[in-house]
Image: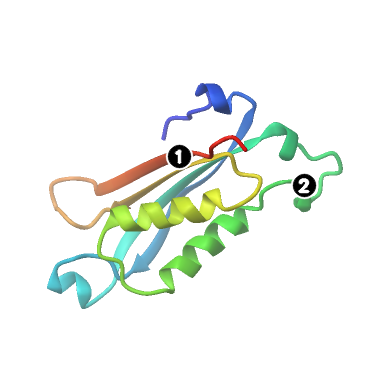
Amino acid sequence: MQSLLNHASLIDCRRLFLRDYEVRMNIGVHDFEKRGEQRVLINVDLYVPLAQSTPANDTLDEVVDYDFIRRSIRERLERGHIHLQETLCDDVLALMLAHPKVRAARVSTEKPDVYPDCDAVGCEVFAVKEAP
């Protein structure tokens, strides 16, 4: 994914990312998709202001922990079947933006095993928090 750090409201941010997080999950609208899990790749970019993510003491509590990203996704998947990748992306995006240090986020999902003649089908969303 291309970085959005040239977006005016993100110029003072650090980009954190989770790349190709592979999960097996129940997703899809077709009957055959509801009978089993599919492989899904999830990508997340978080944009965090440098003022809130530059460690002075080299400690984890000074930054956004990558475990937050994975844990949030896993907790969403545990809630059960999702029909659409759009729903999954929107839900993960909302979870990422709920973190107080995150100013913006981009989330994409890919189902790599749907069609034999292409790498994947997917969806992507991006949002910037409104200024307080």
Secondary element type, mark 2: helix
Question: What residue type is disc 2 on?
Answer: Glu
Q: For the image shown, how many numbered marks are present on the structure?
A: 2
Q: Quickly name the residue at label 2.
A: 62
Around disc 1, counting alpha carbons within 10 Å, would you say few (fewer than 14), some (14 to 19), or many (20 or more)? Answer: some
Q: Residue at x 57, y 28 (%)?
A: 10
What amino acid type should be assigned to the residue bearing mark 1?
Ala
Residue 5's place in the image compared with 132, above or below, is: above
Work out which quarter of the rendered image holds the C terminus and state it.
top right
Q: Nearer the viewer, mark 1 or mark 2?
A: 1
Compared across the picture, whether 119 is left or right of 103 comes to left
Quarter of the view holding residue 131: top right
- In three-dimensional space, the C-alpha distance between marks 1 and 2, rounded to whole angstroms, equals 23 Å
- The x, y position of residue 80, in whole percent, is 36, 74
Residue count near mark 2 (Cα–Cα under 10 Å), binned few <14, some 14–19, many ≥20: some
* Residue at 77% over, 47% down: 62
Quarter of the N terminus within the rendering: top left
Taking the image as shown, residue 120 lies to the left or right of residue 115, namely right
- Sequence-wise, the earlier of marks 1 and 2 is 2
Name the residue tied to disc 1. Answer: 127
Q: Is residue 36 above or below residue 93?
A: below
Q: Nearer the viewer, residue 34 or 83?
A: 83
Check residue 39 in the rendering and tell me which mark sits there, or answer none: none
Q: State the residue lying farthest toward the right.
A: 57
User: Where residue 124 sits in the image (x, y, percent)?
Assistant: 34, 43
CB of mark 1 within 8 Å of CB of mark 2?
no
**Left or right for 79, reference 18:** left
Residue at image position (37%, 52%) is 89
The secondary structure type at the circle numbered 1 is strand
Q: List x then y, in percent, for residue 58.
A: 82, 44
